[in-house]
Image (tube, rainbow, N blue to C red):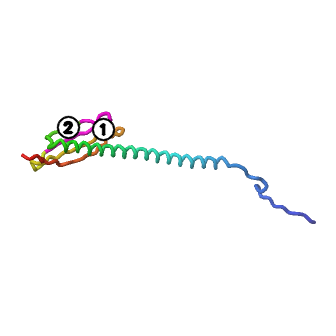
Amino acid sequence: MTGTWSFRRGDEGKERRGFTLVEVLIALAIIAIVLITCVRAQNQSIRLHQLSRDMTIATILARQKMGEIELAGFPELGEEEGDFGDTFPGFTWKTVVSMTPFEEARRTDLSVIWKEGTRERRVDVIAYITNTATE
């Protein structure tokens, strides 16, 4: 008796094409996780950029206002506040001039304040201004 024996596995003769539904769902889940992570990172980057920009503007405005106070001469004791007009809307300033142990010097506290959403942000500068006028 002559004969040929053939052993077949179940899938050996079939050609497999495409992806299964489970593979597609896993791929979509991975893509969704990656996209959500990228969007969150981008949003955080935008928020940090805005904060950095506002901090830079506030610092420049504080230096400018403190320069104006120093150029005006020996400051009077008390508090003042105001804004920077239409040029920098949303930014305000407040100064508090107080005594020091030395009669010839005054402590000047300057705050530049702005809103970021519901939070109030500020840049504070302290300067000691002396009376250089000769009598």
Question: What's the distance in space between the residues labelled 2 and 1, CA to CA?
Answer: 15 Å
> Where does the image place residue 45, in percent across and percent down from the top left?
43, 47
Q: Is residue 99 left or right of residue 26?
A: left
Q: Is residue 39 above or below residue 13?
A: above
Q: Is residue 9 magenta?
A: no
For the residue pair 28 and 35, the one nearer the viewer reads as: 35
Question: Amino acid type of disc 2?
Answer: Glu
Write down the region rendered in magenta. Answer: 82-98
For mark 1, does the 10 Å Cα neighbourhood hold few (<14), some (14 to 19), or many (20 or more) residues? Answer: many
Q: Residue furthest front?
A: 134
Q: Is residue 94 magenta?
A: yes
> Where does the image place residue 23, in percent across and percent down from the top left?
64, 50
Q: Residue furthest bottom?
A: 1
Q: Is residue 124 left or right of residue 73?
A: right
Question: Amino acid type of disc 1?
Answer: Phe
N-term mark: 2 or 1: 2
Q: Which residue is mark 1?
A: 91
Q: Residue at x 14, y 46 (%)?
A: 106
Q: Residue furthest left?
A: 135
Q: Residue furthest right?
A: 1
